[in-house]
Amino acid sequence: MLSRESKEAKMMENRIKRKEREILKATSLLLGLSLVILSTHYVGLAEAWPTTRYYAGYWYGDDAYARGTSGSIYTINPSVPSNNFYCQWHSVVISYTYGYWVQLGYNKNSTTNVNKIYIEVLDSGTPARHVYWYGTPSAGSTHNYLIWRNTGQSSWTCTEDSTNLRTVTPSPYMPVDLQSMSESTTDTGLSINGTHFSYLSFYTGSDWWLWDVAYADPDPCYTMTYDQYYEFHASGGA
Amino acid sequence: MTKYKVMAGCLSIIALTVFCAIISNSMQPKENTEIPYGIVPLSKIATRISFSDSISSLSTLGMQVNSPKWLPTGFTPESAYVRYRSDKMDKYVVFTFSKSGTDKIETSELTIEVYPCESLPFDKNTTLWGKFIEINGLQAYIYDSAPVNIADYKVLYGDTARLVSIQIGSVNYLLRGVPAISMDEMIKIASSL
């Protein structure tokens, strides 16, 4: 027979063991949860997006001497079907035959499901593609996005409103065209209604001039309203 | 008792580390190579015309453009792609050459993208790959495995091309050759411009 003291000691020991087991269980749960979040985070980014793209927007059709492009983009916020995305951006096209460019705009994809500002650079470096993510523009807000470089410099500065987000140094660095587009991975179930690009401008090295010419050939799922060479509305896709 | 304590301690440290990693990751601008965006391809923008028409039209715009006088065996000139700006041709052309009769910008075995340029569009200070050389005494840059971000090209020829960029006067010629063309041949093409 156990004495009263040893019984109490045994009970105390069991209580401590139970508590430790509970702590262990809670910690394991926390770890498990962390790993699930982490795997979703990374697996989500590795999602395979559809390769077909649908566009509505302008290209400038010039100019090797342009020092930049800019314009205001209204932030739409449609729901995005699973495994799809849309983005609205300005691009300095550096080579059409290699597929090199600097792009600034915002994206919403079905993984993160939130509008995010980004910069994308494709050039001859390794890796060839860099994407940098920034803030979250709120639905219904309009932001001015600029990609510009100073004369004699090979680096391009990407600016959102008055904030310089990043300076990038693509190689090669001279532009062959400018584009401002709404892009989507699907022509159904993703409405781009409300799309509005305005004050599209090119940089001469000292001044910003409104686009004096622009070309458009929207995909059949979209309708464009050509307000000016420097402004358009687009809708459709649902 | 000690065993449980050690295990709980280890798991807590791991959990904390993972959480910190997630938080720090989400707070910084991230580099993500997985989401491919795009631009509208030139094939949708440009108009196909003959070599001679493109060269003579560019000449009237004051842009003297040369086409190569030497091509690897079996290659023939295919097409010239130009852009029109308010019904006037823009100072930009892409020539395509092929051995198999492909005249598309995306899949031709050899393309030459020609455009006005202040200087060689590769900066020696920031381009840490490839080589800066002289061809016929002119500034040039060569890179034998330049990435190509065009889906149709990648399907046929892989991820890279042989790149030569040569500056002739105020015009840059950006050559893209499939890996089957040697770099020596690419340089020979560039030197015949």
Image (cartoon, coloured by chain):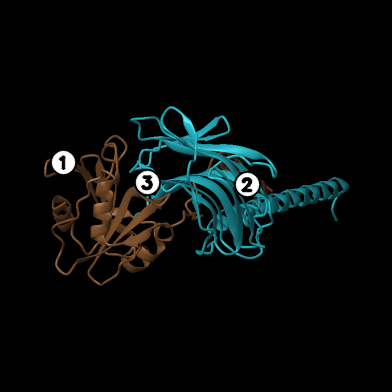
Chain colours: A cyan, B brown
What is the quadrant of residue A109 in the picture? bottom right
Residue nearer the viewer, A48 or A185: A185
Q: Indicate which label's residue lies in the foreground, 1 or 2.
A: 2
The disc placed on residue A176 is 3
SS class of the residue under badge 3?
loop
The disc labelled 2 sits on which kind of residue? Answer: His
Q: Residue at x 13, y 57 (%)?
A: B69
The disc labelled 3 sits on which kind of residue? Answer: Val
SS class of the residue under badge 1?
strand
The disc labelled 1 sits on which kind of residue? Answer: Leu
Q: Indicate which label's residue lies in the foreground, 3 or 1.
A: 3
Residue nearer the viewer, A99 or B179: A99
Could you classify mark 2 by the number of other residues whose Cα lies within 10 Å: few (under 14), some (14-19), or many (20 or more)? many
Q: Which residue is mark 2?
A: A196
Look at the picture and state if A2 lies above or below B50: above
What is the quadrant of residue A224 in the picture? bottom right
Residue A25 visible in the snapshot: yes
Q: Residue at x 65, y 53 (%)?
A: A113
Q: Which residue is mark 1?
A: B138
Could you classify mark 3 by the number of other residues whose Cα lies within 10 Å: few (under 14), some (14-19), or many (20 or more)? many
What is the quadrant of residue A228 in the picture? top right
Q: Residue A68: where, in percent of width, then height?
A: 44, 37
Among the two numbered marks 3 and 2 on one chain, the one whose residue lies closer to the N terminus: 3
Residue A39 visible in the snapshot: no
